[in-house]
Image (cartoon, rainbow, N blue to C red):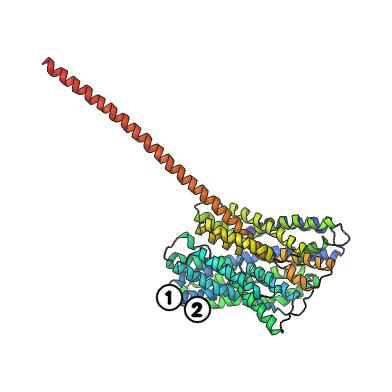
Amino acid sequence: MKTIRVLKETFLSSIPLALVIIVVCGFIAPMENVLDYFKLVIGYLSVILGQTLFLVGLDASILPIGKLVGKSLIRLKKVVFVIFFGFLFGLLATVAEPALAVLSRQANMIMPLINGTMFVWILSAGIGIFVGFALFRVMKDINIKVVFAALYIALFLTIVFVPVEFVALAFDGSGATTGDVSVPFILSLGMGVSATMSRRKTNDDIFGIIGIASVGPILAVFIYGIILKAVNGGNLPPAGIYNPGAFESFAGIISSNLGEVALALLPVVIVFLPFQVFLVKLPKKEFIKILLGAITVYVGLLIFLSGIDFGFAFAGKYIGEIFLDPIRPEWFKWILLLVGFILGVAITLSEPAVTVLGDQLEEITNGHIKKMTIRITLAIGIGFASLLSIVKILTQVNILWFLVPLYAIALIMMKYTSKLFVGLAFDSGGVTGGALTSAFLTPLTLGVAQGVAAVSGESAQSILTNGFGIIAFISVTPLIAVQALGIIYDLRQEAYRKRIEEEEIIGLEQLLKETEIQDNILDELVTQTDKSISMGGDEQ
């Protein structure tokens, strides 16, 4: 029953995306090969079915593991153990992240020098290290605003030494590492530590862990790029062509993914076993349920990734390229801005990690901010992020001319935003670049970049530098959107408090007036009584 409900939700949330595909590929620019439509349909259905099984299994296995480990960490008591296991489980949860698996394939396809498996583990290690640091910050009560300011200043100072091909890819990698698996898992760890080992034990500590962790993969890819360039004598080899449609056999794709998906999920289960034996000690029935859930996650992730390889990424690339076809008028390419905005909004509303974040915010604010409010806020922000990304590609402007001002605005806004919303904003930037984003929007922008390169006569290398970056934009616009929502929320709360205080003052004044009237009446009664007594005495 639950599987059917999740399937229905997944399908309904994908309808806007399906409509865009149908309109573009069916009416605006029909595909020439009928087999391409077959690949598109199989890819789309596989993504829907795979994501459904993945989410059902996730709820039965990976999420309970995260919560159980988070609660059991407090029994270790020592800070060093908490940090170590925070690192370990942050790393392992990220290795299983489907969005990261998609991005690693895309990066390897364009630059074979980048080893896909190594790329995944390098970014996951970045997450793990900074999850440990984020937990340390919670336990030591370090000001989160100071932490974010210091991290991002250091980040942009490091960019000077990074090969240009790895800048946008690093930010995209950061967004892809925090999705459907890692976000609930890491938040579960953080909530367990915050509730028991934080000095203040307030809601402010719950958010911000994902935001801090997201910095790790960026620095990790920066270092990876610097090392690769140094190893290759200061010059990176030329990039290849992005062609996700090269795969022909769906069965062959599934077969090639069997080992890779298993390698992503097995470490999480294996490392959980010692916790089960020594700390958690679940009943046998519940432990078997978690193992069966992990198998469902495996099957779902396998189908999901195979569907992307077979037809979904192909459709995104096709839509990106056809708008730049030389036979079409010059203005036609700017329609991509509208397409990108709609896709950004639609995909964000369907991202499971965004829903998880919205549920937590509604609970923490006692319903003052509804989960749909945060989802719509993020969706609009991501819509504009997609639009800006396409503008960047069409104009071929360096991504830093966009990212530096946007991050500067986000850091300045921290001064006027409460700590709760600062943490929430940076967490939101991490969770919005999920599996669907990597599955469709990244192929779309890579297709646009490939079309721009073909029209302008640029080398394939420009596809690497110009095509990546969509997740970077998707990661920064929520920082501004959510902090703006936080400022509005705080202003409304302040106005509400003032109104309550004014009503209390008015009520108190009214009470004093009534008391004064009652005193006057009482004085009058006393006076009249005294007169009566006096008159009675005279008569006697």
Figure check: 249 above or below 51: below
Label 1 neighbour load within 10 Å: few <14, some 14-19, many 20+: few
Residue 219 location in percent, x, y?
A: 61, 74
The answer to whether residue 205 is left or right of residue 180 is left
Residue on which disc 1 sits: 78
Residue shown at 26%/28% (left/top)? 522
Q: Closest to the observer: 231 or 201?
A: 231
* Residue 443 in sight from this viewpoint: yes
Residue contact between numbered discs 1 and 2, judged by CB atoms under 8 Å: no
**Tag 1: amino acid:** Lys
Q: Closest to the observer: 255 or 121?
A: 121
User: At numbered mark 2, what does the secondary structure look like: helix, strand or loop?
Assistant: helix
User: At numbered mark 1, what does the secondary structure look like: helix, strand or loop?
Assistant: loop
Q: Quadrant of the C terminus?
A: top left
Q: Which mark is residue 327?
A: none
Q: Closest to the observer: 36 or 473?
A: 473
* Residue 285 in sight from this viewpoint: no
Residue 248 location in percent, x, y?
A: 80, 72
Residue on which disc 2 sits: 274
Question: CA gap, disc 1 to disc 2?
Answer: 18 Å
Figure check: 367 above or below 236: above
**Tag 2: amino acid:** Pro
The answer to whether residue 41 is left or right of residue 98 is right
Q: Closest to the observer: 315 or 213?
A: 213
Label 2 neighbour load within 10 Å: few <14, some 14-19, many 20+: few
Q: Quadrant of the N terminus?
A: bottom right
Toward the top, the furthest residue is 539
Residue 384 location in percent, x, y?
A: 68, 56
Disc on the earlier residue, 1 or 2: 1
Residue shown at 69%/73% (left/top)? 166
